[in-house]
Image: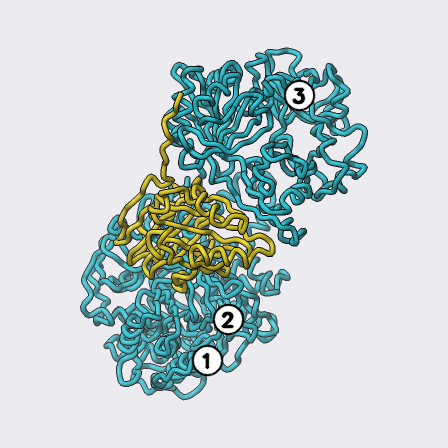
């Protein structure tokens, strides 16, 4: 018997709400791939990244955005997060990236140059943009987000939850937190937005 | 009187809107910008409470956070908050306040009898008086004492308010927006420094708003207002008002409480009540000012007696006169300004009494008594007159007392720095061992006059700019006159007839300190605890130095010889609600939900917390009234046909690298380098000490790619352990770890029809037959028309079973698919409870058996510790004590009487043996009712277990007064040969 295809469920059920003038919306379509750098393979991986996406391995705490339009819809939609000395995350939020399986695509391109682990389903992603973004985050984020630029990324804790933070624009943050605790994460963020003043 | 008859001019509230509030069920009028204290005084309400122990009438003593007497209850119902200082409470329309600590009306407190009995109620009286009968202390004496003494009462309802926490970062934290703080903030702010200026008042300015000074040709209050206006326009400056920095912690971290909406009517806003800020500051400048103190003289606690600076504050800021006839009692020049200001406001000043035998420092047209003292006062519920040591009686309804000023050094002491005594100031000033990167400026540093304070703030800012390489040109410091603040220390009027209070909040008098000294409690710390001096909400802000000075007098020592006061956080009281923040109720911690949670919610699932996870425990169907019915059905149907269960919560760790296999050989007791690609192996992990740490299966997905599973409980600790091993023990290995727990929704499909159910899901051409996909095999495949998946032929239930994993986004849909295709087999979802029953029936160890105190040998897995290789824990697992002949072994137990239920935690003893530790042979770890065997069954550890099959022992639970005869059996109750799972 041929089974019906499985449907996908977004961790935040497609949440989209404006709170105190700031829009919070789930990023439903994104891919997030952990790239581990083989011991001694830094240069070859850098070359592969450069060759395929004009990217290079970022320093820990920084992110590098691609200008490759073949893979991503726009230049800011493919980003490499430097998470630790031998690991980074390749993140794409472009819907077009899903015309084929991003993990398979990256795997084909990088081959043995990196160890890859698909993390696309590991996270709930929330984009918040508006005038109260930083004020709201003051309530739950210990980091000084004012110092963040478009080239900064960090993994931190908010309300006991692991969260990856990037600031693509001054009044905009993208937050990635584990999928299983997505409802607690959303509550933490939206409560902060509601109580920001 | 409720017509603000004591408001003699507009003060700083000329255009303030009139509002009304309620005190003790009576309506009063006030102005926006009033404190509760100023509003009460404006209405002539001097009596506002009763004292802690003697229930003496008490009034308003200060005008700030140091207030020891005017403690009130605010709001009503669940919002009620006791012990709130009227002096820092902003009045708002509709505020309801009431006095506390009295029985009957405030003016006629029944408990005032305590005052007449004061001879018997000296310091520590309860230690001496209520010695017998011993049992009465907890049952009778203490409850009565606590009911009689105590301050306000809690609502005993859940706090309905919202509290927040927050985190701020700044280059320069300025604490206090008085003369020094504002001056420094202007200088640093104009230079572009990222400044956070924090002030506890709702009107920044500190004493600039309380005095009639001039700065740069304008009134000090106007200058403060202009300074604030400028600061709020600077993008690099942030100002927090109504915020108290209450503590200094390591690494430049400061705690602060912002009272966001305490001044707003309940229900009129959507803001949190308070925010507890953690401030990360590269540098700080403490400009916390100084607090005035009193002088000890007879009956110096009556309503109407207040600090001289406070009297000025009420007059100059709020336009309120605390009395119609003001007398001033001082030992310093600052006190004289009170007389000058009141006279200028047209209020009668009946006398200035100065303890110093010098020429009057001010030419003022009022009766002056130099070298004289107040020795007693009169007035039952409010001050009527004072008596001088020279015999004169001065009629006054307000006595303004100034015993000098004590710098607010508290925050400098929070990291154990001790303040230093300054004879010139007759006060402690900050010591040299300040918290890292903290500077002090203004009155807190002994810069008592305005000109010095303004300049000190400015210079401190310049110094910080210089140290940080900031060369910005900024305007010079603001200019003001330097007023005189000469003082000759004078602490207590000797030989007074009445009691002389030192600590108004705790009813501590000079006699209490004398008693403490006589009874040997002479050190500052001992005297504090014996007398309660300096305790409670004010923490002795007006009494500590005075008490220390009196102690020095009694001991015939100097103050430095007697001791110093030192302070710990918090500077002012912090509500428990603020410390909790949002961490209340279900938001106390995050909740983790497996991918099937919503699906399970619609299928009658009952949930249980497993760590942070919420897991389905069982699925109730129509007609089931007891959880056992559901669980038994789930177990029986799974063993009969097929069941499916969400096992996503198991930890999953992606292990990749050229040395991944070698790495796993080191962290696991058994070997993984020999595992073939596409195969799965059970693994046992030991701690360094040789005990079992965790277990699970690990699949080899590729030559250099493994997927490890851990128990749910140990997912984080195992990952952390492996990262430590990777980074610290074997950093040269090429191995990389990524948690994959969240990535995959993983379901166990178990039972004789599990393969048939899966056949409906897996895409061709995958061969799921026993030959094509045998036990302990794994594969990457697609299901349901192309969804990527992983399949593992493993079994926790003992049945033919698989675990199917799909990306988490498809987890809900996969449960739907399993349910839909399972209908043909009467498939059932099963929960954690049925999972547990089946694993006990199969004899699999789980958390109860892997409790950190058991070894591989205890579990019957000793042979898994490979002799052919080394691994973590191997060496210490060979310790003789862990390998004795009588070691515990994991076995099964069934009750001799099958109607009896076993109990986990019961200990095994021989029949007839005493219930002692010496008789103990082991313990029951896990029990369940087995619907398959229709009896209670258990797993447990017992000495020589494997050699004692068929023996009977007693499972004893002394806590439950229960002993059950049990038979020792194999732990494999179901399918001991493993035929089903290999079918």
Chain letter for the yellow part? A
Secondary structure beneath disc 3?
loop
- Check if mark 3's residue and mark 2's residue have beta carbons within 8 Å: no
Query: Which subunit holds the residue at mark 2?
Result: B
At 49% from the left edge and 70% from the top edge, which residue is drawn? B409
Q: Looking at the image, do the residues carrying marks 2 and 1 touch, with CB atoms under 8 Å apart?
A: no
Which residue in the structure is indicated by mark 2?
B495
Establish if B73 lies above or below B844: below
Residue B630 x, y percent position in the rendering: 46, 18
**Residue beneath the point at 39% across and 55% down:** A139
- State the residue at coordinates (54%, 38%): B651
Q: Quadrant of the C terminus of chain B?
A: top right
Q: Spot the cyan chain and give its letter.
A: B
Q: Chain of mark 1?
A: B
- Of B537 and A128, nearer the camera is A128
- Separation of marks 3 and 2 at Cα, in angstroms: 86 Å
Q: Which residue is mark 3?
A: B971
């Amino acid at each position: 018997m041929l089974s019906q295809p499985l449907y996908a469920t977004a961790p935040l059920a497609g949440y989209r709400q404006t709170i105190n003038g700031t829009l919070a919306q789930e990023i439903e379509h994104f891919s997030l791939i952990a790239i581990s750098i083989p011991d001694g393979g830094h240069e070859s991986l850098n070359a592969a990244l450069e060759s395929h996406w004009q990217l290079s391995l970022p320093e820990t705490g920084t992110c590098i955005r691609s200008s490759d339009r073949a893979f991503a819809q726009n230049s800011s939609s493919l980003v490499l997060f430097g998470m630790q000395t031998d690991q980074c995350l390749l993140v794409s939020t472009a819907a077009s990236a899903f015309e084929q399986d991003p993990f398979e695509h990256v795997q084909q391109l990088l081959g043995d140059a990196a160890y890859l682990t698909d993390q696309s389903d590991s996270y709930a992603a929330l984009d918040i943009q508006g005038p109260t973004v930083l004020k709201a985050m003051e309530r739950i984020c210990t980091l000084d987000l004012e110092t963040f630029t478009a080239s900064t990324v960090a993994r931190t804790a908010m309300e006991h939850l692991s969260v990856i933070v990037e600031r693509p624009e001054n009044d905009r943050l993208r937050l990635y937190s584990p999928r299983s605790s997505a409802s607690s994460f959303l509550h933490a963020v939206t409560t902060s937005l509601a109580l920001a003043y | 009187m409720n017509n603000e008859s004591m408001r003699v001019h507009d003060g700083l509230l000329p255009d303030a809107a009139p509002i009304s509030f309620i005190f003790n069920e009576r309506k009063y009028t006030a102005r926006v910008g009033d404190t509760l204290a100023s509003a009460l005084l404006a209405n002539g309400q001097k009596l506002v409470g009763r004292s802690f122990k003697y229930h003496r009438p008490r009034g308003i003593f200060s005008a700030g956070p140091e207030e020891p007497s005017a403690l009130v209850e605010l709001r009503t119902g669940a919002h009620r908050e006791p012990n709130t200082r009227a002096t820092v409470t902003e009045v708002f329309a509709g505020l309801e306040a009431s006095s506390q600590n009295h029985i009957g009306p405030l003016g006629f407190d029944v408990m005032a009898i305590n005052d007449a009995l004061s001879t018997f109620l000296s310091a520590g009286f309860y230690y001496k008086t209520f010695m017998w009968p011993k049992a009465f202390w907890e049952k009778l004496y203490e409850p009565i004492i606590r009911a009689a003494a105590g301050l306000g009462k809690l609502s005993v309802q859940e706090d309905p308010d919202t509290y927040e926490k927050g985190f701020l970062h700044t280059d320069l934290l300025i604490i206090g927006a008085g003369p020094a703080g504002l001056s420094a903030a202007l200088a640093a702010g104009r230079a572009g420094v990222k400044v956070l200026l924090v002030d506890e008042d709702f009107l920044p300015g500190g004493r600039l708003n309380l005095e009639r000074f001039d700065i740069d040709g304008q009134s000090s209050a106007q200058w403060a207002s202009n300074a604030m206006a400028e600061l709020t326009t600077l993008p690099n400056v942030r100002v927090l008002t109504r915020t108290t920095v209450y503590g200094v912690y390591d690494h430049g971290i400061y705690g602060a409480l912002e009272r966001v909406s305490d001044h707003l009517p309940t229900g009129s806003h959507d803001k949190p009540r308070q925010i507890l800020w953690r401030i990360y500051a590269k540098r700080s400048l403490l400009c916390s000012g100084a607090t005035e103190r009193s002088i000890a003289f007879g009956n110096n606690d009556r309503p109407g007696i207040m600090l001289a600076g406070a009297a000025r504050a009420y007059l100059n800021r709020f336009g309120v006169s605390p009395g119609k006839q003001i007398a001033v009692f001082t030992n310093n020049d600052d006190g004289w300004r009170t007389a000058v200001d009141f006279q200028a406001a047209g209020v009668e000043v009946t006398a200035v009494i100065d303890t110093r035998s010098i020429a009057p420092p001010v030419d003022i047209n009022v009766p002056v008594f130099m070298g004289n003292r107040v020795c007693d006062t009169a007035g039952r519920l409010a001050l009527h007159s004072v008596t001088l040591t020279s015999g004169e009686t001065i009629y006054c309804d307000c006595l303004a007392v100034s015993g000098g000023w004590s710098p607010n050094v508290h925050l400098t002491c929070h990291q154990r720095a001790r303040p230093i005594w300054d004879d010139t100031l007759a006060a402690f000033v900050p010591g040299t061992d300040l918290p890292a990167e903290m500077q002090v400026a203004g009155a807190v540093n002994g810069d008592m006059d305005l000109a010095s304070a303004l300049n000190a703030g400015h210079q401190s800012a310049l110094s910080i700019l210089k140290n940080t390489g900031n060369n910005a040109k900024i305007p010079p410091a603001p200019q003001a006159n330097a007023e005189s603040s000469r003082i000759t220390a004078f602490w207590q009027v000797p030989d007074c007839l009445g009691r002389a209070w030192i600590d108004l909040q705790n009813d501590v008098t000079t006699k209490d300190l004398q008693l403490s000294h006589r009874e040997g409690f002479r050190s500052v710390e001992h005297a504090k605890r014996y007398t309660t001096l300096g305790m409670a909400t004010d923490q002795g802000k007006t009494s500590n130095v005075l008490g220390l000075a009196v102690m020095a007098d009694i001991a015939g020592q100097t103050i430095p010889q007697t001791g110093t006061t030192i302070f710990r956080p918090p500077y002012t009281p912090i509500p428990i609600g603020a410390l909790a923040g949002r961490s209340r109720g279900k938001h106390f911690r995050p909740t983790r939900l497996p991918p099937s949670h919503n699906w399970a919610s619609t299928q009658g699932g009952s949930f249980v917390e497993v760590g942070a996870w919420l897991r389905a425990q069982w699925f109730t169907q129509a007609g089931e009234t007891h959880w056992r019915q559901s669980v038994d059905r789930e177990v029986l149907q799974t063993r009969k046909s097929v069941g499916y269960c969400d096992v996503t919560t198991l930890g999953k760790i992606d292990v990749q690298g050229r040395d991944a296999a070698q790495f796993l050989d080191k962290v696991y007791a058994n070997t993984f380098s020999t595992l073939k690609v596409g195969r799965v192996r059970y693994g046992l992990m030991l701690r360094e000490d040789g005990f079992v740490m965790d277990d699970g299966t690990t699949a080899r997905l590729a030559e250099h790619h493994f997927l490890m599973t851990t128990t749910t409980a140990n997912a984080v600790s195992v990952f952390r352990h492996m990262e430590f091993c990777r980074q610290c023990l074997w950093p040269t290995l090429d191995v990389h770890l990524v948690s994959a727990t969240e990535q995959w929704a993983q379901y166990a499909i178990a039972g004789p029809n599990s393969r048939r159910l899966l056949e409906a899901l897996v895409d061709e051409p995958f061969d799921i037959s026993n030959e094509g996909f045998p036990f302990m095999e794994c594969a990457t495949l697609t299901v349901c028309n192309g969804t990527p998946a992983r399949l593992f032929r493993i079994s926790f239930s003992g049945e033919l079973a698989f675990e199917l994993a799909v990306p988490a986004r498809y987890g809900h849909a996969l449960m739907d698919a399993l349910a839909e295709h399972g209908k043909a087999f009467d498939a059932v979802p099963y929960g954690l409870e049925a999972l547990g029953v089946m694993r006990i029936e199969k004899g699999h160890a789980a958390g109860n058996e892997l409790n950190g105190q058991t070894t591989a040998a205890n579990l019957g897995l000793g042979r898994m510790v490979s002799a052919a290789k080394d691994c973590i824990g191997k060496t210490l697992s060979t310790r003789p004590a862990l390998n004795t002949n009588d070691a515990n072994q994991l076995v099964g137990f069934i009750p001799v009487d099958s109607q009896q239920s076993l109990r986990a935690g019961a200990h095994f003893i021989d029949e007839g043996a005493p219930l002692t530790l010496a008789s103990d042979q082991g313990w029951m770890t896990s029990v369940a009712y087995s619907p398959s065997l229709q009896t209670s069954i258990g797993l447990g550890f017992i000495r020589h277990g494997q050699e004692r099959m068929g023996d009977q022992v007693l499972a004893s639970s002394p806590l439950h007064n229960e002993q059950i005869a049990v038979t020792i059996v194999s732990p494999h109750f179901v399918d001991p040969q493993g035929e089903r799972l290999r079918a």
